[in-house]
Image (cartoon, helix red, strand yellow):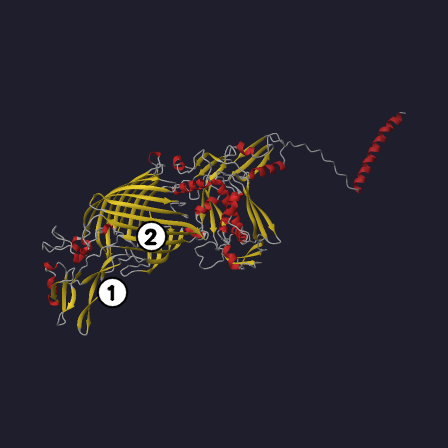
Amino acid sequence: MKHKKRLLPLLMCGTILTGIAVSASAQQAAPPAEATPPEATPVDNTIRSIVVNGSQRLEPSTVLSYMKLRVGQEYTQESADQALKDLFETELFKDVSIRNNGGAVVIEVIENPVINRILLEGNKRIKEDKIYPEIRLAPRQIFTRSKVRADVARIIELYKRKGRFAANVEPKMVQLDQNRVDIVFEINEGPKSKVQQINIIGNEVFSDGKLRGEMATKQSRFYRFFSSSDTYDPDRLAFDQQKLRQFYLTEGYADFRVISAVAELTPDKRDFIITYVVEEGEQYKFGDVSVESDIRDFTAERLTPLLPMETGDAYDAKLVEDTVEQLSETAGLFGYAFADVRPQFDRNKEDLTMSIVFRVAETPRVYVERIDINGNTLTVDKVVRREFRLNEGDAFNSFQVKRSANRIKSLGFFQDELEIEQKQGSAPDRIILEANVEERATGELQLSAGFSSVENFILQSSVRQRNFRGKGQELRASVSYSSFSQAIELGFTEPYLFDRNVAVGVDVFRRDLNSFGFGSTGDRRTTFEQLTTGFQIRAGVPITEFMSATLRYGLSFDDVTLDRNSFFTDNNNDGILGNSPDDTCDPLRSGRFLCDAIGERTTSSIGASLIYDDRDNRLRPTRGQQVVGSLDFAGLGGSVKYLRGRLNASKHWRVFGDFIFNISAEGGYIYPLENRGSAADGIDDVRLTDRFFLGEPQIRGFDIRGVGPRVIRSGFVPEIVDGRAVNSVVDFNTNRNNVNDDAIGGRTYYLARAELEIPLGSGARELGLRPSIFVDAGAVFNVTRPSLVTSQVQLVNDDGDPLFLTVDNTGAIVTTVDATDAMGIANEPALNTNPLVSFTEQFFGDSPSPRVSVGFGVNWNSPFGPFRIDIARALLKEPGDDTKLFTFNVGTQF
């Protein structure tokens, strides 16, 4: 037993040693197995804090509000990426980074800069004031790339609308201090894309040229340099499809349609070729046309006969639209503002007829509930309200609404396209009239200088306020100076005295007019000077809606003088002409008609005018007429006595679409109420300064005062015929260099004019071009034949030697002097003239025969000021008339 106990530990040791040996042997036979790694310790990703670095304008809390990371959440790569995306989407940051330092999340941001300025470079064809409204970025905004890209797209689209499809815009950023930037858009405008050709396929009834004429887009041609209609515009392409459809509908082709419209660039990528494919269909005619009305006093029996279309006429969709509008306006005259007029069509494709019933639905009579005026910041409400022809509570009348809009536009205080909106009132039978006005500048402070073919150099300064204190009053003052006239004028007009429909005004003036004729050198020469000082008081009252009357009283003082050194005689023998009060006007130097004109006089006159005016706009009318009859009596005291009457009439209307045609006529007569002399004396009872004169600018194609009675003083030119000296009078029609030409006016005149204003494309309208063609006709006549003077006629004596004769008004010889003694006659006071001057006076132009001229002209509101040019040719004239082909007037403001 004891041995067994000792043997047991030995056996255990042996077993262990044997195991170790076996294990070692096994390790030599195969590689040992890998040890299992210890289990990883879990990491805590909980966000303990969030810090924002780099923000300048934004508060850290604001930055944190843009993302979803919050303290206490688990930080993951997905949440970090989402936070970056959220921050970049705000477009407030140029760069953002996020890092996690053991639960302490740090967000580094670089804010986008603030825009300091936005600049444009390279834009020449489109001005900055057209581009800047397209740009959404603005100074003091945050710079973002997406907004810059959007603005680039808008600018390029603007150039495309102008036909420049090759335009390119490159934005650049100029870095400034304090994290500010300037944004510069560098623009390469590229060439203008024209419409090289317009093809139309499928048209059989109408030619390609006819259909192209209906389109707003035109083919590029050299003569369209003032128009933009030949530039490619995709919006205009869609508009032209509608224009084609409207044209075919007016011609009766109700089934017409445009199958396709394609614009293709030419191979050189510069121009476009447009191709339309159309289907015309069949032409329809009007069938039965009638009216059905549910409105009382607006019966079908009365309206059907007034319809403009008749059965069998070619169908015209435009005529149908006009009829609907006419019926609606007619209903408006009866007080039905919301009349519902609907045409019901019955198309018969078998006999190709279109029957129409104009259905007028029942509607209540409408009354004006309220009149609202919006947009007037300076003009007081009553100035606008008093132009309304309707008052609150009145029955609605569509004609009176239109008339009100025209009267408001005629004030000139608001935009041209003013409309009075009609809105539903608080009840079905109530209407609200709303005038949304947009005020324009009514004050004018102008300094202008220019050159006129009539008065040469012109200098003018004026101050004018057409809406003084916002009450519709007009206050003006002006000073003008030119080669032949100087004037200063002050005026004030109150259109509604004490809020009554009575207009009053006063004008004070001083004018210095230097009248002129044509001298022997062909240039204008001053003849008499008229200095006028005076005032006028006027008042006007309406009689009816379109008729008014005005009364006026004027008092003026005139002093008419001649240059004493040029036209007076040395009666005191001091050797200086005109130096002494005894010196008198010399008819041989000036002509008797000028000597009769000089002197001081006072004119006290009272006058009245009756005016009918229904034009749609007094400033620039397009339709309507005006008739003005006036009568003035001078003799209410003063030294001048006459009765003068005038009649003016004009009419405007639209023709051929947007053409504006105007005809006008005027005439006048002055009847003397005093006897200043006799016809035998050559003195007219109407003074020279009170007569009518005619010429440029009243009748174009003739020079200023170039029409009517005149005295022409022609020189004598010696000629040698068969060895003897003879004399011939200069032909003033071919040679103006040796004549003096003085217009003396007449008692009667008339003038007529027809003018057609031609509409141009949008490009020309933007330039302010308004061309027109015209015909002018008129005459001034009826004056006493003046006493004529002939002096120093050069003849020959019996020996063939030159001989100088001085003759008087009757032709009797005053003296005869040989040429050898001619030099000594210059100092002979008895002759009262210079014997070396040989002339004869002739009287021309006192004829009622019409003078007629035709021509064309252009008004241009140029960048340097208003410009007007007229080219006119006289077709009918009388001997002595002064014609002129070319006239212009230009000035500038500074």
Identify which amino acid the numbered label 2 is placed on.
Answer: Val
Tag 2 secondary structure: strand
Q: Work out which quarter of the rendered image holds the N terminus and state it.
A: top right
Q: Please indicate, yes or no, whether residue 626 appears anywhere in the rendered image.
A: yes
Identify which amino acid the numbered label 1 is placed on.
Answer: Asp
Residue lying at the far front of the rendered structure: 301
Q: Please indicate, yes or no, whether residue 152 appears anywhere in the rendered image.
A: no
Residue lying at the far top of the rendered structure: 2
Whether label 1 touches label 2, CB < 8 Å: no
Report the disc number at residue 731.
Answer: 1
Residue 194 percent across, percent down from the top left? 49, 56
Near-viewer residue (95 or 870)? 870
Q: Is residue 453 left or right of residue 622?
A: left
Residue holding disc 2: 890
Residue 866 percent across, percent down from the top left? 35, 50
Label 1 – label 2 distance at C-alpha = 34 Å
Tell me if mark 2 has few (under 14), some (14-19) or many (20+) residues whose alpha carbon lies within 10 angstroms of its own.
some
First in sequence: mark 1 vs mark 2: 1
Residue lying at the far right of the rendered structure: 1
Tell me if mark 1 has few (under 14), some (14-19) or many (20+) residues whose alpha carbon lies within 10 angstroms of its own.
few
Near-viewer residue (720 or 806)? 806
Report the disc number at residue 578.
Answer: none
